[in-house]
Amino acid sequence: MDTIKAQQWLIGIFSVLLIVVLIIIAGMEMKKSREYKPEIEIDKMTAKCITCHEKKGIAVKQIDAWKESRHAVMGIGCYECHEAKEGEFDAMRCPESDIIVGRHPTPKDCSRCHKKEVQEFSESKHAHQFWLFKNADRAVFEFPLATKHGCEQCHQIGNLWPDGSVGECDACHAKHSFSIAVARQPETCGECHLGPDHPHIEIYLESKHGNIFKAKGKDWDMSYSSKEGNPIPIEVPVCTTCHMDGNETQPMTHNVSARLAWESQMTWSFRTVWNEDILGDWQVKRDRMTAICNSCHAPDFVDTYFLTADLVNLQYNEIRREFVRWTKKLTKSGLISRLKADGKFYSNPVLNGWDEVPEHEMYYAWHHEGRRFRHGAEMMGADYTQWHGIWEIQEDMIELITWAAEHGDAEAKKWVNSDHPSKFIPYALYDIPGNVWGINVKANTTPFVYNNYPDYWDRVYKNVEAAYKQGLLSEKQWNLWLKRYKNKDHYMGLKYSADSTWNYYKQRNEYDLKKMKEQVIDFTLPGKPFYKK
């Protein structure tokens, strides 16, 4: 009996082990099926290229990348992209071979198959490299070598090739896999869109969008199809979702300017007129972006968020206007001068100048802090709107006026000697009652202007109305602003009371301060100091 039971136990144990082994094998097979390696046929010309490169050990990893590409699966080999004729600008004869190839496949080469994508790209701001025309900051303040792996490395995306084509497709689509998934990674855009003057990748990662992507994005298939009519298949947007990919109503595009309503990288924010005959006016472009945002957000949230960001752009202009006034004034009085050689001016004090403090501060207030202020507001980057944005712009303004005072300007001296808080807002203001995040009952206890100017909202009303009449805000936006203005007591929380909750936290705060005073402020060490004054 005991022997039979022992045999039954052994059979049971081996059965369980067998099941476990089968499960492991099944899992391995499933993993193999997911790790699909495409079957490719290599033609004679491509075989020559591969054989030679592998034999000589030249760029063999690029061959591996190509083998996993859609190009390889579709029978598009090396020569289809690298074909060239004698006399072409990039033609070269492969060593120990009679084959002529093109060293630099250009968008003109890509357009043989991707005509629509190349055309869309050529009509975008990626292709328009304004720095070629107005690059005094790089051409004067920096020496040429510094830009080779600096400015030029990123601006190569708009390279003007000898064959007349514009762009650099593999700036986003990695050689030689041309992976859509790689192109969609925020870090791909972040190769260029980062740093003090355009920290878009940092702004994105600070936003809730970026936060969710970092937590979950590794599990998403980023090679999805993005045709019009297809819903967005990922939980939150990446850069391409908003600027390129399609959804239920919007077609996919390689024109990254098609959905942008502002030129907010410029010295002034102005409503874009870029390719209006093809793309439509700024309101059409905004409607395209709104259609993408509405895939995830409620329309009221989207409209209010954009209106607030638009007012930030308009507010920047008024601050910029004050910088321009000061630099022109100081130039006219001779306190600052312009760089010139042989009678030709190489810098403009209101655009770029670095040898004197006012020019330096004005440049940063536009090119660095001013962009961060605007772009942070547009992309949900609170810290970039605030501490890296408006706070530093205000510091730039203070340092400019203080410099002017130290160098004898009477108006600047008067400003420096003033002890009135209004001196920090010497420009017209825009505002919107409340915010997009909800009703905050006690949010209005702090702002100086709310409490000291009874006609504050009347002044702001006139400014917003003027912007609307100038065509800088749409009729829909004006009506949305009016709705909030007429109900500002609601949106600003003024008609509500939460005194019991407020008093509770006020008491907690007073207790904290009391303990801080006891533990630190009133605490003095008894030992003698080591330095006698």
Image (tube, helix red, strand yellow):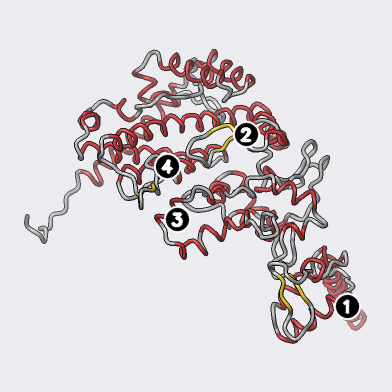
Query: Would you identify the image quadrant in which residue 290 lies?
Result: top right
Which amino acid type is shown beneath numbered disc 1? Lys
Q: Which mark is residue 139?
A: 3
Q: Which mark is residue 44?
A: 1
| Label located before the other in sequence (2 or 4) | 2
Which amino acid type is shown beneath numbered disc 3? Ala
Q: CA distance from mark 2 to mark 4?
A: 21 Å
The secondary element bearing badge 2 is classed as loop
Which amino acid type is shown beneath numbered disc 2? Val
Query: Would you identify the image quadrant in which residue 395 lies?
Result: top left
| Label located before the other in sequence (1 or 2) | 1
Q: Is residue 286 above or below residue 64?
A: above
User: Where residue 244 appears, x then y in whole percent?
Assistant: 71, 45
- Going by the image, does 127 lie left or right of 443? right
Q: Residue furthest left?
A: 532
- Going by the image, does 431 lie left or right of 251? left
Local crowd at mark 4 within 10 Å, few (<14), some, or many (≥20)?
some
**Residue 508 in view in this figure:** no
Q: Is residue 264 above or below residue 300?
A: below
Q: Is residue 56 above or below residue 27?
A: below
| Label located before the other in sequence (4 or 3) | 3
In front here: 397 or 345? 345
Residue located beneath label 2 in the image: 273
In front here: 358 or 229? 358
Q: Nearer the viewer, mark 3 or mark 1?
A: 3
- Going by the image, does 318 lie left or right of 75? left
The secondary element bearing badge 4 is classed as loop
Question: Residue at 79% across / 52% down in the picture?
Answer: 224
User: Where residue 455 appears, x then y in whole percent?
Assistant: 40, 13
User: Where residue 354 appears, x then y in whole percent?
Assistant: 35, 49
Q: Which mark is residue 20?
A: none
Query: Would you identify the image quadrant in which residue 350 lies?
Result: top left
